[in-house]
Amino acid sequence: MIAAAVADLAGHLDEAHASQARLLELVTRQRPAIVAADHETVDALAAEIEIEVRRLAAIEKARTAAAQALADERGLAATRWSSLQGALAPDELAALAPRIDRIERSIRDLELANAINAQLVHRELEMVDLSVRSLAQPDPRTAPNAYTAAGGRVAAPPVAPVLLNTAA
């Protein structure tokens, strides 16, 4: 029979996995919007992601408390899975191990999806930076016309001194 502390931890692990699955779905939905430069959709999904991250933080807090309760019940100082699994009965281990594996896979999938989205955003920001820099350069094909408040042309700036290499 599974102890109540193990069942409680299993429930929190299931909640964490469900939240991570929702996060992965949101991050995956955000990718095409990033590629399409659909900023409204990216922002809307970012708001949903933020809400889900907050939800996951609350779930993780409860999961940590459940793991601590189980560790205390078993006389363990640490709540890491590597410490807990040695103190579990076979049926308890069978109840928790698959959940831990699912969560670890979800975390890897989320890390990969976030890395891909981050690279796409970074690439778009580089393109924006390049565009802004190219717009900031004066176009050599046009004359730099500047006018005073009265409508007259501003005198051309003095030519910068040029140093000549006389040793050459």
Image: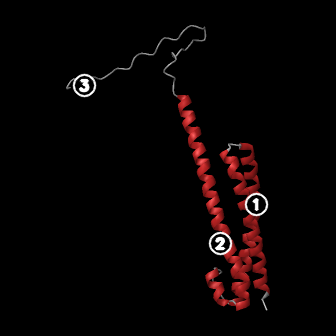
Q: Amino acid at mark 1?
A: Glu
- Secondary structure state at the residue bearing disc 3: loop
Q: Which of 67/150 is in front?
A: 67
- Secondary structure state at the residue bearing disc 2: helix
Q: Quarter-wise, where is residue 78 in the image?
A: bottom right
Q: Is residue 128 above or below residue 159?
A: below
120 left or right, relative to 28: left
Q: Which mark is residue 165?
A: 3
Q: Which of 75/137 is in front?
A: 137
Q: Residue at x 51, y 23 (%)?
A: 139
User: CA gap, disc 3 to disc 1?
Assistant: 66 Å
Q: Amino acid at mark 3?
A: Asn
Does any portion of residue 89 appear in the rendered image? no
Number of residues whose C-alpha sits closer than 10 Å to that of mark 3, classed few (under 14), some (14–19) or many (20 or more)? few
Q: Residue at x 68, y 52 (%)?
A: 31
Badge 3 or badge 1: first in the primary sequence: 1
136 left or right, relative to 95: left
Q: Which mark is residue 52?
A: 1
Q: Check disc 2 and report the residue beneath it.
A: 104
Colouring scheme, one of rainbow, by chain, secondary structure, one colour: secondary structure
- Secondary structure state at the residue bearing disc 1: helix
User: CA gap, disc 1 to disc 2?
Assistant: 18 Å
Number of residues whose C-alpha sits closer than 10 Å to that of mark 1, classed few (under 14), some (14–19) or many (20 or more)? some
Q: Is residue 43 above or below residue 49?
A: above
